[in-house]
Amino acid sequence: MLKSYLKKKLPRSQRLKLRNITNDILSIGSGYNLDKLGKIYGTDKFGEHFYTQHYKHHFRKYKFKRIKLLEIGVGGYKDPYAGGNSLRMWKRYFPLGKIFSLDIENKSPLNESRIKIFKGSQVDEPFLNAILQKTRNFDLIIDDGSHINEHVITTFNILFPKLNDGGIYVIEDTQTSYWEGYGGDSSDLQNPNTMMNYFKNLTDSLNNKEFLIHGYQQSYFDKKIISIHFYHNMIFIYKGNNDEESNIVTNNQM
């Protein structure tokens, strides 16, 4: 009854602010519980998916740091007032963090204190570089954008080098690696153009010091990926200095 009354009497921008205030009140005492925060703020990272259980494991150490988080994809499609649920969840979970996002649609009505959304494509390198000029590098990056295999791979190649050392790059909804409509493939599970095979192949970078290749030159990913964690429909890639030497191989020779 009250909800119907407010819908008639208040403009949508005011209803959005009221909803955010209500959710912030409901979240008091749940700052550590990402499952509960996900439910309160209405993000599909909890319930529809099972992502918050992994996020709370990997992101907990950043909770009270002054991190900068970028999430690709806001949600809500063309509706400028729809989406942004996970951005508000991250804002609540990281009380000292700055939350940034980008979307192909205009989502400017969802901007608020500590949340800034840019309009543009995740595969537009000049656009991404323009964002980085304003924000500098990020500590956490989440790709919840188009889920098109080619886009995911292209965006990773552009943004992973901009991730701070000690940071984490996350890919969500990797099931599209098997769906033809997104450039995936369920028939040829060795297809090098799918995101799953792309990231599976990067696991070799972790062990590049063991390659028996005379004169081998390390790639950027050889040097900077220190671990990769695969879960159902998501991947976490950790960045740092992959400088642990082999106990047997020297300069890629026995």
Image (spheres, rainbow, N blue to C red):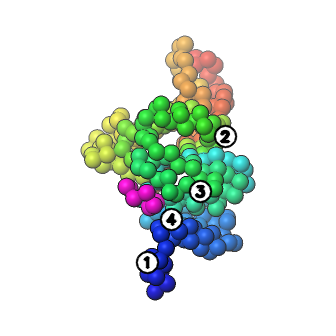
Up/down of 107 relative to 163, above or below = below
Secondary structure under tag 2 reads strand
What stretch of residues is rendered in magenta?
A: 77-83
The residue at 39%/39% (across/down) is 151
Disc 1 marks a residue whose amino acid type is: Lys
Give the number of the mark in front: 4 or 3.
4
Quadrant in the rendering for residue 90: bottom right
Return the disc, 2 or 1, that comes first in the chain's sequence. 1
Q: What residue would you read off at disc 3? A: 112
Given residues 100 and 3, the one toward you in this image is 3
Q: Nearer the viewer, mark 2 or mark 4?
A: 4
Query: Image height check: is 100 above or below 43?
Result: above
Q: Which mark is residue 8?
A: 1
Of labels 2 and 4, earlier in sequence is 4
Examine the structure image and report whether residue 177 is included in the region drawn in magenta: no
Sequence-earlier tag: 4 or 1 = 1
Which amino acid, by three-letter code, is at mark 2? Gly
Q: Position of residue 238 (x, y in %)?
A: 60, 41
Q: How far apart are the two marked residues, 4 and 1, measured between alpha carbons?
A: 13 Å
Q: How far apart in space, not on screen, are marks 2 and 1 (Cα)?
A: 48 Å
Spatial CA distance of label 2 from label 3 is 27 Å
- Mark 2, residue position: 166
How far is mark 1 from mark 3, CA to CA?
A: 24 Å
Mark sitting on residue 13: 4
Residue 117, horizontal then vertical, whole percent: 53, 49
Q: Residue at x 56, y 71 (%)?
A: 18
Q: Position of residue 160 (x, y in %)?
A: 54, 35
Quadrant location, the C terminus: top right
